[in-house]
Image: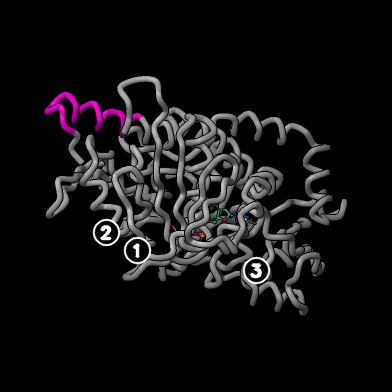
């Protein structure tokens, strides 16, 4: 268990890939940072190594359930069955379930048998809604066992857990963005031609439901040349229709002002560089959405769809918090997510070329706003450090109150 001083704790992180890449994308980022910046001995349990391998090519997707692979000093375990036997010796000092996944019952039993008991956290999804501040750090008692789990929420205010961000990220980003030769070399290596690099560059990552064809049409008939870089496998139908060919890596077509190019789906580290290299980024879900904020360039977010249009509430909450005075950003974001007002007088109901032209015209003030937002978000500390500080506080509290760890 966590020692009183000095020894870095051990931490087990449990991740189930529901769909897409965000679950493992976030867990992998967190695991790496815990290990690298805080010396934490991390075991990452993940049920889908194939998705993991796409973000991190060093991972072997063929590893057996019992087999542990060390990837960038993180112990990776394939979480295949929930009936694996665990003893208290297997339990980490801090146990994190991502997005409320159900831990194996045998692991929970082993946690309850530990002295002292581990700190147990549920790391939740990101939302800009106000209720998050009230739920962050709330305890939840286990109905039968002497264990307490605490909710830990990422967020955009100092009363939340903050956002994932590596210590050196800002410096790396600024260095890259102030080095045109490095940007050029990076894009050239993705196959982006010189004329495409000279145009306004937009990266595109969205769900298949996004109105991509309408956007392509607006770009095609736009006033200035635009290069859209789309990682392979994204918006496949719209991309292939525009290309008139399979959307494999290297496919490119120029029509009107738009050049559309398919680039590889990048390892996670290189994806940051793509965001830094582009003038505008279309991102989605949670992790790429946060990375676009750290890129400090204008971005449009395609939010993960939820029942009863809950995601529209979340989208508006974010837009309000992020840039309440940026009307063109609001209009384009709402339209991109199908959250626009049916009212014809509403700016988000405008035709696509007009929506894009207004957004494009506001790019300069928006870019300044992005820099200010990035600075502001940094003042809340980073999620990894905040999570470790909270875990230490929970443990200290437990020691002080009873000398016995609460769960
Ligand atoms: O893949 P996503 O749609 O993930 C989503 C969200 O996390 C959502 O909240 C969750 O509920 C759902 O999954 C199950 O989008 P996200 O969060 O941006 O994650 C994508 C990851 O993929 C991110 O870590 C960036 C990474 N990525 C690359 O590494 N290379 C690439 O080329 C691209 C396009 C993305």
**Lower position in the chain sequence, tag 3 or tag 1:** 1
Mark 2 element type:
helix
Range drawn in magenta: 389-404
Q: Read off the residue under disc 2.
A: 105
Q: Residue at x 77, y 33 (%)?
A: 179
The percent coordinates of residue 296 (x first, y second) are: 59, 39
The numbered dot on residue 51 is none
Vertical arrangement, residue 250 with respect to residue 113, above or below: below
Q: Residue furthest right?
A: 194
Nearer the N terminus, badge 3 or badge 2?
Answer: 2
Question: In this rendering, is residue 152 above or below 58?
Answer: above
- For the point 62% across and 50% down, which residue is it? 268
Q: Is residue 368 above or below residue 238?
A: above
* Disc on the earlier residue, 2 or 1: 1
Of tags 3 and 1, the one toward the viewer is 1
Can see residue 163?
Answer: yes
Q: Which residue is mark 1?
A: 82
Quadrant housing the C terminus? top left
Question: Is 322 part of what is drawn in magenta?
Answer: no
Front residue (pair 76, 395): 76
Q: How far is mark 3 from mark 1, CA to CA?
A: 32 Å
In this orientation, does residue 331 appear?
A: no
For image coordinates 76% across by 56% down, the residue present is 224
Asked if residue 41 lies left or right of residue 360, the reply is: left
How crowded pointer 3 is (Cα within 10 Å; few <14, some 14-19, many 20+) is rated as some
**Residue 258, horizontal then vertical, whole percent:** 76, 63
Residues marked 2 and 1 touching at CB (< 8 Å): yes
On the image, numbered disc 3 is attached to which residue? 233
Taking the magenta stretch, the answer to whether it contains residue 391 is yes
Which sits in the foreground, 59 or 369?
59
């Amino acid at each position: 268990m966590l020692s009183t001083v000095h020894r870095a704790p051990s931490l087990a992180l449990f991740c189930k890939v529901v769909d897409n890449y965000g679950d493992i994308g976030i867990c992998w980022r967190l695991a790496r940072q815990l290990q690298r910046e805080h010396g934490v001995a991390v075991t990452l349990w993940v049920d889908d190594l194939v998705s993991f391998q796409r973000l991190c090519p060093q991972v072997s997707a063929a590893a057996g359930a019992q087999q542990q692979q060390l990837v960038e000093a993180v112990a990776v375990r394939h979480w295949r069955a929930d009936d694996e036997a665990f003893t208290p010796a297997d339990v980490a000092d801090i146990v994190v379930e991502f997005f409320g996944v159900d831990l194996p019952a045998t692991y929970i039993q082993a946690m309850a048998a530990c002295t002292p008991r581990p700190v147990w956290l549920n790391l939740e999804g990101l939302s800009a809604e106000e209720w998050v501040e009230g739920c962050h750090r709330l305890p939840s008692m286990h109905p039968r066992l002497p264990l307490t789990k605490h909710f830990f929420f990422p967020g955009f205010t100092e009363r939340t857990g903050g956002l994932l961000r590596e210590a050196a990220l800002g410096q790396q980003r600024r260095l890259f963005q102030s080095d045109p030769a490095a940007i050029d070399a990076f894009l050239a290596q993705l196959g982006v031609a010189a004329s495409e690099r000279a145009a306004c560059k937009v990266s595109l990552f969205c769900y298949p439901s996004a109105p991509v064809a309408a956007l392509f049409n607006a770009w095609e008939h736009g006033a200035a040349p635009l290069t859209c870089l789309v990682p392979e496998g994204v918006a496949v139908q719209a991309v292939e229709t525009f290309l008139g060919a399979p959307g494999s890596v290297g496919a490119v077509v120029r029509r009107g002002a738009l050049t559309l190019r398919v680039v590889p789906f990048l390892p996670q580290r290189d994806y940051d560089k793509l965001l830094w290299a582009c003038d505008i980024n279309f991102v989605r879900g949670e992790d790429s959405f946060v990375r676009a904020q750290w890129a400090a360039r204008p971005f449009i977010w395609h939010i993960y769809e939820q029942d009863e249009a809950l995601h529209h509430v979340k989208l508006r909450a974010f837009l309000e918090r992020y840039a309440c005075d940026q009307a063109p950003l609001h209009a384009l974001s709402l339209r991109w997510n199908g959250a626009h007002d049916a009212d014809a007088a509403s700016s988000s109901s405008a035709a696509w070329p007009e929506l894009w032209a207004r957004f494009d015209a506001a790019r300069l003030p928006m870019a300044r706003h992005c820099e200010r937002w990035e600075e502001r978000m940094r003042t809340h500390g980073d999620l990894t450090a905040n999570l470790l500080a909270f875990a230490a506080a929970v443990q200290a509290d437990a020691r002080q109150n009873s000398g016995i760890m609460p769960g």
